[in-house]
Amino acid sequence: MGSRRRKTKPRNEPAVQPARKRKWLPIVAAVVGVGIVAVVVFVNLPGRESDAAKGREQPVPIAATNTAPVTATSARGSAAKPSFDVLKGRWQRPDGGYVVEVKSVDDSGKMDASYSNPRRINVSKAEASRDGTAIKVFIELRDANYPGSTYNLTYDPQRDQLQGIYYQAALQQQFEVVFVRMN
């Protein structure tokens, strides 16, 4: 049997081949860069709500001297007494998962209402009243972490909103709030 002879490389050839030029690398880098810019632009588009705007932040307290509730006038300009029936339904604060549900309101203003955040919180008092043509809503909460917190709201018929002041009793702070009608 013959012995196998190994081929040896000529001495003038390098032992390791030089790396091939990677012509595709700048193209990939450019595509990734454009993708990142597109994502940043999309996230910051005007009109697009951030997580903070969706209610993950607490409302900003109002100055202690500004305690007057927000008032609204009727779009109709009618001097007739507005009906409390407009209050019936579910109302949500856009700055969080706070929901007021008004099941009924009698002619004297006594309301059957519930409140959740997102769990149910005991409503100790809920009533509606009239101030000229404006409809006012008062809700008092008595539960764990809600030792007499209150909502003083006014119905805005032009926007179909409840807006006013939330008094957080545990923190002894007031916040301007708005509730929008849920479908």
Image (spheres, grey):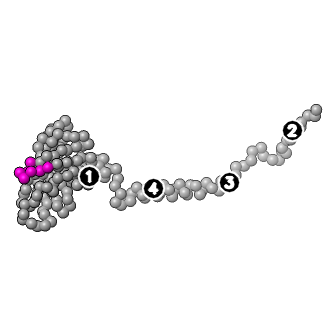
Q: Is residue 9 left or right of residue 117?
A: right
Going by the numbered disc 1, the residue's amino acid type is: Pro
Residue 84 lies in what quarter of the image?
Answer: bottom left
Q: Which sits in the foreground, 87 or 16? A: 87
User: Quick one: label 4 or label 3, which is nearer the N terminus?
Assistant: 3
Q: Measured from the top left, where is residue 153 in percent x and y?
A: 14, 52
The span from disc 1 to disc 3 (Cα, nearest Å) is 56 Å
Circle 1: element type:
loop
Going by the numbered disc 2, the residue's amino acid type is: Arg
Q: Measured from the top left, where is residue 3 in percent x and y?
A: 91, 34
The span from disc 3 to disc 2 (Cα, nearest Å) is 31 Å
Query: Which residue is disc 3 drawn over?
Result: 21
- The magenta span reads 104-110
Q: Is residue 172 visible?
A: no
**Classed neighbour count for the residue bearing mark 2: other residues with Cα under 10 Å, few (<14), some (14–19), many (≥20):** few
Q: Is residue 128 left or right of residue 158?
A: left
- Asked if residue 14 is positioned above or below residue 41 in the image, the reply reads above
Query: Which residue is disc 4 drawn over?
Result: 39
Q: Measured from the top left, where is residue 139 in percent x and y?
A: 13, 46
Q: Which mark is residue 6?
A: 2
Q: Of all residues shown, which one is farthest toward the bottom? A: 77
For the point 5% across and 51% down, the residue is 108
Q: Give the quarter of the figure containing the C terminus.
A: bottom left
Query: Which residue is disc 1 drawn over?
Result: 94
Q: How many marks?
A: 4
Q: Are marks 4 and 1 in contact (CB under 8 Å)?
A: no
